[in-house]
């Protein structure tokens, strides 16, 4: 084998290994399963007057990652009547989660929100700086959540 072929083979090997490492880190490496909602079985929803209310949830499953404020995804059930008066969340855009977190599907949530089969409400505003917790609720009590960037603060350096 010539020196050129060896160099090309090594470059290809490094590229494949780098790609595999990046894929693994994005899909598995940073995520961790969250056992409970900060020690309770309740979720916060925001009311039109700005007050918040604790809502009991069951079957809570979630993932999160320290690497980004918007990697939180959750699946749970609740009483839809408990969130009927919560603030509707305009512009709810379900964010994709890793494929192995099977209970959450951004594609299905987007389709159901568009079709009016589910409603999005504000869970908690500014759960992290410039990030809201959005909750989608179905009439049968299934609920899903994610963190989404908000537009409360304009980007730095932009003047009106």
Image (cartoon, rainbow, N blue to C red):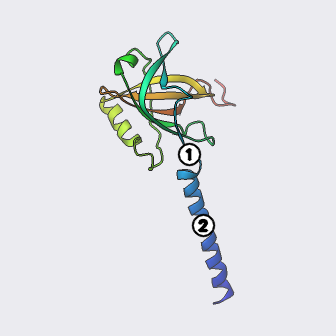
For the residue pair 5 and 145, the one nearer the viewer reads as: 145
Mark 2 crowdedness (10 Å alpha carbons): few <14, some 14-19, many ≥20: few
Q: Which residue is mark 1?
A: 31
Would you say residue 152 is visible in this rendering?
A: yes
Most extreme residue toward the bottom is: 1
Q: Image height check: is 24 above or below 65?
A: below
For the residue pair 119 and 75, the one nearer the viewer reads as: 75
**Residue 129 x %, y %:** 63, 28
For the residue pair 21 and 101, the one nearer the viewer reads as: 101
Tell me which residue sits at (52%, 52%) in the image: 27
For the residue pair 43 and 124, the one nearer the viewer reads as: 43
SS class, disc 2: helix
Q: Which mark is residue 17?
A: 2
**Residue 85 x %, y %:** 40, 14
Mark 1 crowdedness (10 Å alpha carbons): few <14, some 14-19, many ≥20: many
Number of labels in the image equals 2
Tell me which residue sits at (55%, 28%) in the image: 39
Q: Image height check: is 81 above or below 22?
A: above
Would you say residue 89 is visible in this rendering?
A: no
**Residue 159 x %, y %:** 66, 26
Q: Please report whichever mark, 2 or 1, sits nearer to the chain's N-terminal start.
A: 2
């Amino acid at each position: 084998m010539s020196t050129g072929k060896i160099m090309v083979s090594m470059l290809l090997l490094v590229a494949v290994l780098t790609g595999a490492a990046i894929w693994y880190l994005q899909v598995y490496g940073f995520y961790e399963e969250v056992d409970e909602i900060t020690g309770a079985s309740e979720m916060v929803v925001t009311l039109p007057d700005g007050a918040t209310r604790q809502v009991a949830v069951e079957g809570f499953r979630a993932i999160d990652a320290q690497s980004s404020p918007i990697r939180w995804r959750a699946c749970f059930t609740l009483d839809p009547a408990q969130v009927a008066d919560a603030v509707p969340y305009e512009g709810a855009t379900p964010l994709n989660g890793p494929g192995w977190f099977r209970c959450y599907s951004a594609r299905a949530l987007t389709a159901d929100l568009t079709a009016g089969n589910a409603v999005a409400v504000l869970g908690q505003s500014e759960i992290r700086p410039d990030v809201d917790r959005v909750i989608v609720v179905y009439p049968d009590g299934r609920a899903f959540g994610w963190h989404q960037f908000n537009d409360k603060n304009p980007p730095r350096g932009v003047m009106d």
